[in-house]
Image (tube, rainbow, N blue to C red):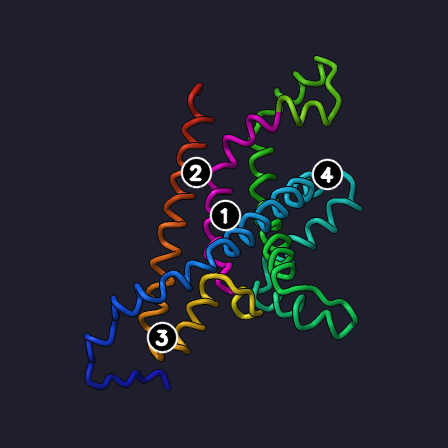
Amino acid sequence: MLGIEINEIQIEKLFNAERAWANLPFILEGVPLTLLVALSGMLVGLVLGFFLALARGSDRVWLRWPARFYISFMRGTPILVYLFVLYFGLPVVGIKMPATVAAIIGFGTNSAAYIAEINRASLNSVPNGQWESSRALGFTYWQAIRRIIMPQATRIAIPPLGNVFLDLLKATSLAAMISVPEILNKAQIAAGRTVDSMTMYITAALVYWPLTMIFSALQDYLEKRHNRYL
């Protein structure tokens, strides 16, 4: 049932450098849209995740339980299924949107669930004495969040948030399944045009790799900057 058939392995067909170089400009055309989906999705996730984290930790049941349900649902369903619902399912009930918009909404609202848990853990890691001190200084709840709690929680949240973004950047390849012309979609088109899927998919992987390295370096910079005065 799980048998693997191995015929004569042809190493020369594994990767054609000349063909990869010729199609690289076409595949690179998908980079701007990949970054747009990833960065926009992360922005949506950060904003929504912040308020979800506050609602998740609220004493008000009518805020806490809907937030818990949302987080549980988004973390418990495959992102690809959610993208299909947004792009192929919603038109059935009369709601249509461009593939890129569906991808941004899908990745943003899905990543918000993970970001919310990161934010909640980061906020809870700030000692209660910081809350008490802010109240003693006469700060309102939102003033305390903005001036006292968030600067401390941000330092704790940066590493896991950076990992969420890197996962999101790579997950944008799933947007190819709803015809978003990002990197993998371009590689699929090139593979069909050249009849060399192995070379084109390896080329796509080699495009994703430096992108993740750049953002990993940015994450390291932000971590060092926030830890400078510890």
In the rendered image, which quarter is residue 84 located in? bottom right
Alpha-carbon distance for marks 4 and 3?
Answer: 51 Å
Q: Quadrant of residue 52?
A: top right
Q: Is residue 11 left or right of residue 167?
A: left
Q: Which residue is mark 4?
A: 58
Q: Earlier in the sequence, mark 3 or mark 1?
A: 1
In the rendered structure, which amino acid carries the disc numbered 4? Ser
Indicate which disc residue 11 carries.
none
C-alpha gap between disc 2 and disc 4: 30 Å
Q: Does residue 202 sit above or below 45 in this rendering?
A: below
Foreground mark, 3 or 1, reads: 3
Q: Residue at x 66, y 26 (%)?
A: 146
Q: Is residue 200 magenta?
A: no
Judging by the rendered image, the residue that carries numbered circle 1 is 165
| Camera-nearest label, 2 or 3 | 3
Residue 166: say if magenta. yes
User: Which residue position holds label 2?
Assistant: 219
Q: Magenta segment range?
A: 149-174
Cβ atoms under marks 1 and 2 closer than 8 Å: yes
Give the Cα separation between the discs numbered 2 and 3.
33 Å
Identify the residue under disc 3: 197
Residue 20 in the figure: left or right of residue 64: left
